[in-house]
Image: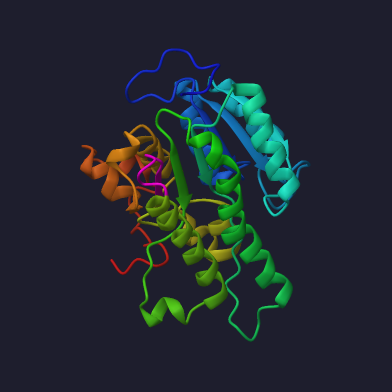
């Protein structure tokens, strides 16, 4: 069944559906939440940023206000996806507030591009705990409720499993954690195929203009060669509104999916229309 508080469902809409997501205070996660909110979805956020940070735009509270302003209902849970207790609070809160869980978005992720000799054990553990463990355990906690949803989806923001030495040798620990997320997504799809729970990974064709691009990867030059988070949000919306038995077990590239659904003009997504776009990590073309 859909969430008990849901109004009548409409094909192609997330109205009344409940989305549980990790992260979402900013960037791609917030863009996906806002796209769902415009349909009238319920959004449960589990995120750490409780107070303003001069290096990062937005908090869980500003995100919640934006989701409500966009037309959604929201339950913000201040917590860390590394915490089993915080995950339990988020799942229980979603069920209490909205009657169930229809979709899980594994969005929270830590990025450190240090090589093996430079990376500290503490930073390695952080990436593994947030990226791979967080994906696995948030999904695990939500699955008993997804199994009762009409159109259950698990969507994980992680890349194709590209074994080219270019990527394996660039930043092994980060790659290991992100590929771990993708393996989670593909494994859930196989394990719960008969139950009709869809599980897919989603990755952008180009770099996306987020705080990571601006502060870590390449600064203003890479930012202007990126696309806006809305392209990933539109692709996520298209996936989440597809019947779960029709699309599962895939690593999906945002542009490819939108092109297959009829989008031909991608210029509105560009930060700077005249700039040459920068391919994202793990993509060879």
Q: Main secondary structure of the magenta part?
A: loop
Residue ID at (64%, 86%): 117
Relative height, residue 16 to residue 87 (above, below) = above
Asked if 168 appears above or below 127 in the picture, the reply is below
Direction from residue 128 to residue 202 in the image, left or right: left
Quick check: is 193 in the magenta stretch?
yes
From the top left corner, tell me how far across and down residue 174 is, in percent.
Answer: 55, 70
Q: Which range of residues does the magenta coloring cover?
A: 192-200
Q: Is residue 14 visible?
A: yes
Place residue 22 in its image quadrant. top right
Q: Note whether 263 is above or below 187 in the view shown.
A: above
- Residue placed at 45% from the left, 62% from the top? 183
| Left or right of residue 8, residue 44 in this image | right
Q: Position of residue 239 (x, y in %)?
A: 36, 39
Residue furthest toward the top? 8
Q: Outermost residue, right direction? A: 51
For the point 37% across and 76% down, the residue is 163
The quarter holding residue 91 reads top right
Confirm whether the magenta stretch covers residue 171.
no
Give how far across and how far down residue 41 sits, in percent.
50, 24
Report how many numbered discs are placed on residues in the image.
0
239 vs 118, left or right, is left
Residue 225 visible: no
User: Viewer-proximal residue, 31 or 180?
Assistant: 180
Give 145 or 228, whichever is nearer the viewer: 145
Query: Residue 128 appears at what percent x and percent y?
Result: 62, 65
Of the pair 152 and 251, the residue shown nearer to us: 152
């Amino acid at each position: 069944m859909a969430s008990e508080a849901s109004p009548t469902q409409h094909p192609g809409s997330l109205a009344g559906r409940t989305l549980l997501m990790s992260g979402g205070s900013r960037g791609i996660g917030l863009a996906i939440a806002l796209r769902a909110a415009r349909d009238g979805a319920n959004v449960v956020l589990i995120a750490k940023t409780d107070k303003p940070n001069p290096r990062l735009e937005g908090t869980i509270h500003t995100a919640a206000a934006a989701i409500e302003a966009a037309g959604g209902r929201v339950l913000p849970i201040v917590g860390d996806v590394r915490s089993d207790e915080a995950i339990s609070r988020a799942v229980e809160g979603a069920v209490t507030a909205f009657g169930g869980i229809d979709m899980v978005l594994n969005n929270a992720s830590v990025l450190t591009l240090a090589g093996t000799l430079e990376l500290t054990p503490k930073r390695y553990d952080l990436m593994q705990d947030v990226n791979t463990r967080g994906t696995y355990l948030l999904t695990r906690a939500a699955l008993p409720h997804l199994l009762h949803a009409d159109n259950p989806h698990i969507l994980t923001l992680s890349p194709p499993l590209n074994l080219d030495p270019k990527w394996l040798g660039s930043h092994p620990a980060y790659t290991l954690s992100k590929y771990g997320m993708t393996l989670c997504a593909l494994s859930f799809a196989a394990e719960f195929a008969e139950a009709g729970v869809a599980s897919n990974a989603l990755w952008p064709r180009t770099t996306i203009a987020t705080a990571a691009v601006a502060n870590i990867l390449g600064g203003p030059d890479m930012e202007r060669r990126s696309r806006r988070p809305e392209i990933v949000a539109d692709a996520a919306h298209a996936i989440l509104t597809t019947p779960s038995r029709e699309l599962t077990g895939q690593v999906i590239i945002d542009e490819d999916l939108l092109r297959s659904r009829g989008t031909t003009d991608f210029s509105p997504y560009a930060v700077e229309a005249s700039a040459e776009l920068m391919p994202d990590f793990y993509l060879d073309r």
